[in-house]
């Protein structure tokens, strides 16, 4: 057996308890007496990120990574330069109207962060009339990490602008103001800012000790944060709170939700800062989810799964009688999944899925200023496989006549359109320019179907160079996620171009656990005690690519991030023979130890995703796929793991423990590398140049082990 390669953490006995623990919320049905297990790598957990022994081990990982990737330096630099050639280093986002201004963001070659700008309405973005609202590059000076979540002008004049910034990567934001006019500082927030109707106050959300969003506050300009009024506290650890504002600006919506249940409260902002009385739309009922959008102030459009409408139905509800949910506007459909609803003065927009692809529907008001199902219209697109999204972040005007959306496919770069809802025409606002010799005619996109062990057909989206001879096998990268109902879309992304331009087939496995084929693809297909379907689907996709002759195990790579890292970890334990090299970004791999501990961020909220291992019902099933708990003495592919020290979603110790466990037990001499970023969190660096360098080193690692270095067309 080859000697372990890379740092292997020493083992120290530590008892982990599953089940009832006095003084802790272990869920409604914890095992009593509890089960106890030894976790000899538990010592790598340091919530404060200051333990010298732990930091010393992380530095060992970092040094080992740098030692092992010296041979990737040239290839990584080549891939990095390709990424820069594909982006427009100096660029401007699609401008949008917000009251009396046009807002947009600029990027400048050589600068790492965005510059937020505006021009008065009627002036040209980027002209001499431009006003720089906030330059993130100045905020980032002298900082190892800087992420601005939101820049929000105060209505109606926009003379005040608030922004939220995180300097550590732990996703805890401080709210400040542009300029020196307002000295107010609000700390410990989730970064979301909602202004009141007149700019005299704003609303924000704070987190509890486990980083759960749970309190909604009002801050009055000029007051200390200690004087702020708490409007809502979510006491149930399985729920989190968020907020938004109605289109007409007169109502604050506070939504408390778990994965399966929702409760919405309304606050009438016309009552001023002294009005704190919340109106409950519908009290929470286990398993009933709903979203609310207001048409004017008194009519609610409610998107809900109530009455077993798993794909959603839309109801019209009067604010004066919020419990009357009898009037159905858009009925439930087995073929159409409605995910989102937004309402404007003369139309509503529905976003969702049909036939495995994203879709957008509009619905205009009739002559009586009310909505009718007969006026629902699905927007049509030419390509057979595509992705389209509503861009609500660029739709701030309630009285607008246009809808902002994006469109792309795996061969067509993104275009931003304004859709004229009444007339049906579309105006392109911005077309993404792709440099580096990109030509869409050089690429082919198609969709395949793999068959899972239970007979379910699993879609696979492919993109590859048109010059490839598909009668022969080729190097292939298979990407997957498969959790929370999140879809991995067949959309354009320059990230895969360094693969495809070298003759690698890039494939997306649309496995269950995502929402690609409707809500049941997630809720019934791969959640709780059906979660293993996610892993079996991915294996089926890999087997299909091999059996169809597109690739071979020695030419097949795989990748997943976060919960997609769980997918990769589980699959590599189950079928390591299918893959030659793998990437796992910030992987959720220590399922059992993490999910039993309610003090770890996201744990209690995610009991409705994976199950709760403190309960007999879930313990054995979750243990059967938890990656760390199923590492065994067998050969594994080459593996690169990416982690961030300040990650609040998947703590750094999970990937580090996994690497040590693999090195201790695996029977091969393949590489296991940990790319430990000591300055960032879950979403990697916010510095765009650093981000592309990190992407390049990961892709160079894959290309090295697939023995693919040269471009096909150059």
Image (cartoon, rainbow, N blue to C red):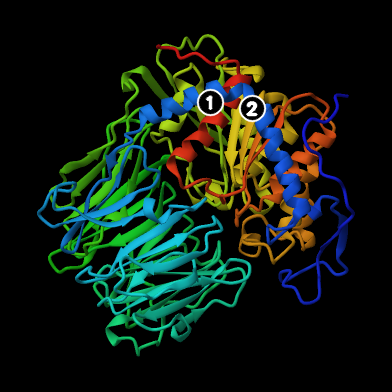
- Toward the front, the furthest residue is 142
User: Badge 2: few (under 14), some or many (20 or more) residues near its Cα, within 10 Å?
Assistant: some
Residue 178 percent coordinates (x, y) = 32, 65
Q: Is residue 418 left or right of residue 457?
A: left
Residue 596, numbered circle: none
Residue 629 sits above or below residue 190 on the image: above
- Toward the left, the furthest residue is 122
User: Badge 1: few (under 14), some or many (20 or more) residues near its Cα, within 10 Å?
Assistant: many
**Residue 321 picture quarter:** bottom left
Residue 76, numbered circle: 1
Circle 2/circle 1 CB separation < 8 Å: yes
In the picture of the structure, the residue carrying the numbered disc 2 is: 69
Residue 64 percent coordinates (x, y) = 71, 34
| Closest to the observer, 572 or 372 | 572
Please indicate, yes or no, whether residue 626 appears anywhere in the rendered image: no
Residue 326 sits above or below residue 643 on the image: below
Q: How many angstroms separate mark 2 from mark 1 (CA)?
A: 9 Å
Residue 543 percent coordinates (x, y) = 63, 25
* Residue at x 59% of width, y 29% of height: 541
The quarter of the image holding the C terminus is top left
**Residue 62 picture quarter:** top right
Mark 1 element type:
helix
Q: Along the polypeptide, which appears first: circle 2 or circle 1?
A: 2
Residue 509 percent coordinates (x, y) = 54, 34
* Residue at x 32% of width, y 64% of height: 152
Q: Is residue 664 left or right of residue 560?
A: right
The quarter of the image holding the N terminus is top right
Mark 2 element type:
loop
| Closest to the observer, 593 or 617 | 593
* Residue at x 77% of width, y 63% of height: 615
Residue 260 sits above or below residue 283 on the image: above
Q: How many marks?
A: 2
């Amino acid at each position: 057996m080859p000697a372990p390669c890379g740092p292997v953490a020493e083992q120290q006995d530590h008892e982990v308890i599953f089940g009832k623990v006095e003084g802790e919320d272990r869920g409604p049905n914890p095992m009593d007496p509890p089960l106890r297990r030894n976790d000899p790598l538990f010592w790598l957990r340091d919530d404060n990120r200051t333990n010298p022994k732990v930091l010393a081990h992380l530095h060992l990982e970092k040094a080992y990574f740098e030692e092992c990737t010296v041979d990737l330096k040239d290839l990584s630099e080549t891939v990095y330069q390709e990424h820069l050639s594909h982006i427009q280093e100096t660029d401007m986002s699609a401008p949008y109207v917000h009251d009396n201004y046009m807002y947009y963001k600029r990027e400048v070659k050589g600068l790492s962060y965005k510059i937020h700008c505006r021009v008065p309405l009627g002036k040209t973005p980027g002209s001499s009339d431009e006003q720089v609202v906030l330059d993130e590059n100045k905020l980032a000076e002298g900082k190892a990490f800087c992420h601005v979540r939101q820049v929000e002008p105060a209505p109606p004049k926009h003379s005040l602008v608030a922004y939220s910034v995180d300097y550590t990567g732990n996703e805890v934001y401080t709210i400040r103001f542009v300029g020196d006019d307002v000295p107010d500082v609000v700390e410990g927030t989730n970064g979301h800012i909602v202004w009141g109707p007149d700019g005299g106050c704003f609303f924000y959300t704070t987190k509890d000790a486990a980083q759960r969003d749970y309190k909604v506050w009002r801050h009055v300009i000029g007051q200390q944060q200690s004087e702020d009024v708490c409007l809502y506290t979510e006491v149930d650890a399985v729920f989190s709170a968020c907020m938004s504002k109605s289109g007409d600006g007169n109502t604050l919506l506070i939504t408390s939700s778990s994965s399966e249940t929702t409760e919405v409260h309304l606050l009438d902002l016309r009552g001023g800062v002294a009005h704190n009385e919340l109106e409950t739309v519908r009290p929470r009922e286990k398993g009933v989810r709903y979203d609310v959008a207001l048409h004017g102030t008194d009519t609610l459009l409610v998107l809900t799964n109530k009455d077993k409408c798993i794909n959603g139905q839309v109801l019209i509800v009067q604010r004066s009688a919020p419990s009357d949910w009898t009037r159905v506007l858009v009925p439930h459909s087995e073929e159409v999944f409605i995910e989102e609803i937004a309402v404007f003065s003369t139309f509503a927009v529905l976003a969702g899925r049909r036939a495995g692809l994203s879709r957008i529907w509009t619905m205009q008001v009739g002559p009586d200023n009310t909505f009718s199902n007969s006026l629902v219209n699905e927007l049509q697109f030419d390509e057979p496989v595509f992705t389209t999204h509503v861009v609500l972040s660029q739709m701030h005007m309630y009285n607008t006549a246009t809808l902002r959306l994006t469109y792309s496919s795996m061969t067509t770069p993104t275009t931003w359109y304004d859709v004229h809802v009444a007339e049906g025409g579309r105006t392109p606002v911005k077309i993404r320019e792709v440099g580096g010799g990109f030509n869409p005619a050089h690429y082919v996109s198609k969709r395949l179907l793999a068959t899972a062990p239970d007979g379910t057909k699993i879609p696979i989206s492919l993109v590859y160079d048109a010059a490839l001879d598909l009668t022969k096998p080729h190097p292939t990268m298979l990407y997957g996620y498969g959790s929370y109902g999140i879809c991995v879309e067949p959309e354009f992304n320059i990230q895969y171009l360094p693969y495809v331009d070298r003759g690698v087939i890039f494939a997306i496995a649309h496995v269950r656990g995502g929402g690609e084929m409707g809500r049941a693809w997630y809720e019934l297909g791969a959640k709780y005690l059906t979660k293993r379907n996610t892993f079996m689907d991915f294996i089926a996709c890999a087997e299909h690519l091999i059996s169809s002759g597109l690739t071979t195990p020695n030419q097949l790579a795989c990748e997943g991030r976060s919960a997609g890292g769980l997918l990769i970890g589980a699959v590599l334990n189950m079928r390591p023979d299918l893959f030659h090299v793998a990437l796992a970004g910030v992987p959720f791999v220590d399922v059992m130890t993490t999910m039993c501990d309610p003090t770890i961020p996201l744990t209690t909220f995610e009991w409705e995703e994976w199950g709760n291992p403190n309960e007999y019902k879930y313990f054995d099933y979750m243990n059967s796929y938890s990656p760390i708990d199923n590492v065994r003495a067998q050969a594994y592919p080459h593996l690169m793991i990416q982690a961030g020290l300040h990650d609040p979603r998947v703590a750094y110790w999970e990937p580090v423990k996994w690497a040590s466990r693999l090195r201790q037990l695996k029977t091969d001499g393949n590489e296991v590398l940990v790319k430990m970023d000591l300055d960032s969190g879950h979403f990697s660096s916010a510095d765009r140049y650093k981000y592309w360098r990190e992407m390049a080193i990961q892709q160079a690692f894959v290309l090295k082990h697939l023995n693919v270095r040269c471009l096909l067309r150059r």
